[in-house]
């Protein structure tokens, strides 16, 4: 009778968790946005409190919720199980539904398309997006901040590399190996294919056969911009494409913690998809480091890690004698898996990775790309950037892409995915890019 | 596998983690909690035995002779002393100025409602109360509903806080963040100085800085020329938030894994050993293995115990039997703020002298499972658990850590 009794099923659905709220304001004092702006009254007010005035059939009465970045810290710190961030996300969608969304939000929400389309014009776009007058124009016309760090298009996609690699395969795939599905996400596909390659190579190094079935954007950018209907379409595509693997016990592993969090939790708790397939998928996806750490706990992870002194010179130079600051992104914290990246990095001889005491870097997906929220995004992350600078570190680690770009821009450090350090330790370099 | 897994981020859980890094710096420690824990709703001073006159530890010694089942008796007075001293040492290290010189004596502090309390160990902000003199001036902020200084004392002043348009109600934390800004506190100092009028000290609600607390108090004292001290506010408590924030940094720097946000849903046992715990994580439960586990999830208020409308009371992770009264009529006394507290505050799990919680058969639930803090039962006739609140949390945490770290 220990756990069943605490999980009252009728209070588990996001909107009803508001009934657990004691109005203690613990979430308000922890909210990183509240701490830097007067424009946002805080999670308690726009979440469980405003929830009492939100009639499912009427438009939402309150617009300040638009300033919620969706970082999810409120949900984590609430001692009473209120899903504050999820309540806010649903309220934002309600607002977007009633008032329509701006062209800017529509563009940011459809990041999945721009990644693939932009690949075709990569050299041109990469130059354009670093051309200040152009960015100024984009800010003035669309409201996309000229200060925000834009990724560069790699010029080829992870999927194209993968297809080519499969075609060129001389030795047939070893069918006796356990299979893992790799979920790459949009960013790895278009901007950082090297992370996808390393993921594949590390999994293969550990004896797996990797497959990359068709998959869609996780839908998170749409979801956080309030476009739930379309986000659900993406979500359903993924459920359709991947749930069956989960059912068959084939792990689905992803390198983008926020996308994986969408599959694990948001589809159900934000988008309200309660069907069995969605649940099956949720229980079968793993963050990349979570998966490797599980392997390690079962004694199945290869730990032939080289010490930092055997890393390539340019990486060693970045690390120097310093600690390597690790930032656990909000979305990773929301997994409830601990800090598997740190646990793994601790296995690398001579590496001293230390978790930074920072709730949020500020960018929160597309939030920090919005001109009117840019200052907030920079101020929220300021303590983190300061700590990284003070540590003297020139290399830092973070699991999600937008956070990495933001932290790198604001702190001056080079910020890598934990997988990149694991790869150095394994002595694995990304296979050469395929020419399209 | 971790050497030590602590469940709960309240006074007991957080200090257990801090004690553990001191007692065994090489240990792998993980702390898992559903949300931010109790310090943030307490004044963040240490109540050891508020009614004690003279040497507090002597009075605790008397208490444990009279109540051999009291959590203090399980932990031992020695553990209390060591715990309080180590806590103060860490509290000073993280810049909060906790002081615990022996012999420990209760101090006088003021409350926002004009009464006095007598905790034994104070962080920096409350220490000035001891030298408040005959005429403390109580300062409040115009338009702030959380604190009204006329309730605190006869000499009070309301000042206009130097902040622009305030679209929403401010929380204590908002004020504390403002005080961290030099221009804000300089403005406040100027307004208060004009109102001093012979005051022997100045009391503020406990919002004097979040990050730079000591600096803020010192600056105000220098400017005003009299002692400055704080009064606890409505929650969330700024002194509690300071403690939580600084301890968090302290623990992360010492490689403790802090996982706030997902509750432990059950313990995993094999025979008489705990293998680890299962966390209600996103998507699927997550297992965390450990050599020893400290259960510090708190009582009915803290989230460690649960009850229902039939008067049943149970422990939520291991299903440990709870010492309680079945008749709900007897849970509460007549007066809400009665100093002796209420029967319900005494409910908890029973433990042996090794801080191991006891099952229905009176034997330890598991050899490597320990309990700390207010999940422990207090004898029904013992003083209100609030009188010994932080003392019990710290002493039992210390003892539990000592024993847990001895696990193979
Ligand atoms: S949502 Fe949770 S943390 Fe926020 S006020 Fe309510 S109970 Fe407190
Ligand atoms: S999700 Fe983040 S920004 Fe939004 S209310 Fe919660 S803590 Fe604040």
Image (cartoon, helix red, strand yellow):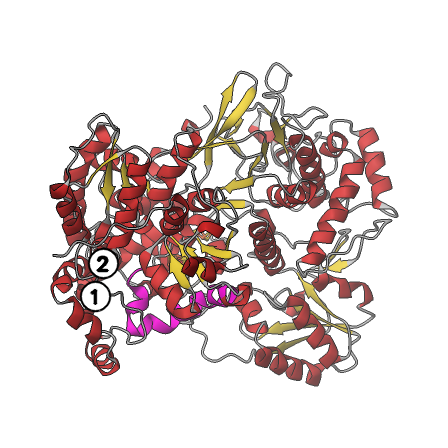
Q: Is residue B147 left or right of residue A150?
A: right
Of helix, strand and loop, which one carries label 2? loop
Residue drawn 64% across the image and 67% down it: B213
Of helix, strand and loop, which one carries label 1? helix
Q: Which residues are magenta?
A: A364-388
Q: Give B110 or B126, whichever is nearer the viewer.
A: B126
Q: Position of residue A22 (x, y in %)?
A: 47, 49
Label located before the other in sequence (1 or 2) = 1
Q: Chain of mark 1?
A: A
The answer to whether residue A324 shows anywhere in this view is yes
Q: Is residue A384 magenta?
A: yes
Occupied quadrant, residue B173: bottom right
Q: Position of residue A333 (x, y in %)?
A: 41, 48
User: What residue would you read off at disc 2?
Assistant: A226
The answer to whether residue A269 shows anywhere in this view is no
Q: Quadrant of the image for the C terminus of chain A?
A: bottom left
- Look at the numbered discs 1 and 2 and tell me whether their residues touch, using CB distance below 8 Å: yes
Q: Give A29 or A360, whichever is nearer the viewer.
A: A360
User: What residue would you read off at disc 1?
Assistant: A105
Q: Residue furthest top?
A: B361
């Amino acid at each position: 009778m220990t756990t069943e009794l605490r999980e009252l099923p009728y209070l588990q659905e996001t909107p009803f968790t508001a009934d657990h709220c004691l109005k203690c304001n613990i979430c308000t004092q922890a909210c990183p946005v509240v701490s830097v702006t007067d424009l946002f009254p805080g999670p308690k007010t726009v979440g469980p409190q405003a929830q009492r005035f939100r009639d499912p059939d009427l438009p939402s009465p309150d617009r300040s919720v638009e300033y919620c970045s969706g970082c999810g810290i409120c949900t984590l710190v609430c001692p009473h199980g209120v899903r504050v961030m999820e309540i806010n996300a649903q309220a934002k969608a309600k607002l977007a539904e009633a008032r329509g969304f701006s062209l800017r939000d529509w563009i940011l929400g459809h990041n999945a398309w721009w990644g693939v389309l932009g690949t075709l014009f990569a050299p041109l776009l990469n130059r354009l997006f670093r051309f200040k007058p152009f960015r100024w124009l984009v800010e003035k016309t669309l409201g996309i901040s000229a200060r925000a760090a834009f990724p560069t298009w790699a010029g080829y996609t992870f999927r194209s590399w993968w297809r080519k690699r499969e075609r060129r395969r001389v030795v047939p795939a070893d069918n006796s190996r356990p299979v893992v599905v790799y979920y790459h996400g949009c960013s790895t596909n278009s901007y950082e294919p090297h992370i996808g390659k390393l993921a594949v190579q590390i999994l293969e190094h550990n004896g797996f056969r990797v497959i990359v079935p068709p998959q869609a954007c996780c839908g998170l950018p749409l979801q956080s911009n309030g476009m739930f209907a379309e986000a659900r379409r993406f979500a359903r595509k993924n459920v359709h494409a991947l749930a069956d693997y989960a059912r068959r016990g084939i792990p689905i592993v992803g390198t983008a913690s926020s996308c994986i969090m969408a599959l694990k939790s948001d589809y159900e708790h934000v988008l309200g998809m309660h069907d069995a397939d969605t649940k099956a998928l949720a229980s079968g996806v793993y963050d990349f480091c979570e998966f490797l750490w599980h392997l390690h706990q079962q004694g199945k992870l290869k730990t032939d890690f080289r010490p930092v002194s055997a890393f390539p010179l340019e990486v060693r130079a970045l690390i120097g004698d310093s600690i390597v600051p690790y930032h656990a992104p909000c979305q990773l914290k929301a997994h409830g898996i601990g800090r598997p990246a740190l646990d793994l990095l601790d296995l690398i001889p001579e590496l001293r990775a230390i978790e930074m005491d920072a709730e949020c870097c500020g960018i929160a997906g597309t939030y920090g790309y919005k001109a009117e929220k840019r200052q907030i995004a920079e101020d929220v992350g300021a303590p983190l950037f300061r700590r990284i600078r003070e540590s003297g570190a020139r290399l830092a680690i973070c699991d999600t892409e937008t956070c990495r770009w933001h932290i790198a821009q604001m702190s001056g450090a080079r910020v890598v995915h934990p997988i990149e350090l694991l790869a150095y330790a394994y002595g694995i370099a990304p296979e050469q890019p395929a020419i399209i | 596998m971790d050497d030590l897994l602590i469940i709960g981020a309240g006074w007991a859980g957080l200090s257990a983690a801090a004690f553990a890094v001191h007692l065994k710096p090489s240990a792998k420690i993980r702390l898992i909690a559903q949300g931010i824990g109790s310090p943030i709703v307490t004044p963040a001073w240490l109540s050891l035995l508020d009614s004690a006159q003279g040497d507090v530890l002597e009075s605790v010694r008397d208490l444990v002779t009279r109540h051999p089942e009291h959590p203090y008796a399980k932990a031992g007075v020695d553990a209390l002393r060591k715990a309080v001293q180590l806590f103060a040492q860490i509290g000073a290290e993280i810049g909060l100025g906790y002081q615990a010189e022996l012999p420990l004596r209760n101090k006088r502090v003021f409350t926002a409602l004009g009464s006095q309390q007598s905790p034994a160990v104070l962080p920096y902000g409350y220490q000035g109360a001891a030298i408040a003199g005959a005429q403390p001036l109580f300062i409040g902020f115009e338009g702030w509903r959380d604190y009204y200084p006329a309730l605190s004392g006869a000499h009070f002043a309301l000042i206009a806080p130097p902040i622009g348009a305030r679209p929403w109600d401010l929380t204590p934390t908002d004020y504390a963040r403002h005080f961290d800004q030099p221009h804000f506190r300089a403005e406040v100092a100027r307004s208060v100085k004009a109102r001093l009028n012979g005051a022997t000290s100045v009391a503020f609600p406990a919002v004097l800085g979040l990050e730079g607390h000591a600096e803020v108090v010192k600056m105000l004292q220098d400017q005003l020329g009299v002692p400055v001290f704080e009064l606890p506010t409505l929650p969330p408590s700024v002194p509690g938030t300071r403690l939580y924030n600084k301890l968090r940094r302290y623990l992360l720097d010492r490689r403790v894994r802090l996982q706030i946000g997902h509750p432990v849903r059950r313990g995993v046992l094999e025979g008489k050993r705990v293998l680890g715990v299962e966390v209600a994580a996103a998507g699927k439960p997550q297992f965390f293995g450990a050599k020893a586990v400290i259960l510090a999830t708190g009582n009915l208020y803290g989230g460690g115990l649960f009850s229902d409308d039939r008067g049943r009371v149970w422990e939520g992770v291991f299903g440990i039997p709870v010492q309680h009264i079945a008749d709900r009529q007897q849970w509460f006394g007549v007066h809400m703020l009665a100093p002796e507290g209420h029967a319900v505050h005494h409910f908890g799990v029973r433990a042996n002298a090794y801080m191991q919680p006891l099952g229905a058969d009176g034997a330890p639930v598991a050899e490597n499972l320990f309990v700390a803090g207010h999940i422990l039962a207090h004898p029904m006739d013992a003083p209100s658990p609030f009188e010994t609140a932080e003392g019990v949390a710290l002493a039992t945490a210390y003892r539990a850590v000592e024993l847990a770290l001895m696990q193979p």
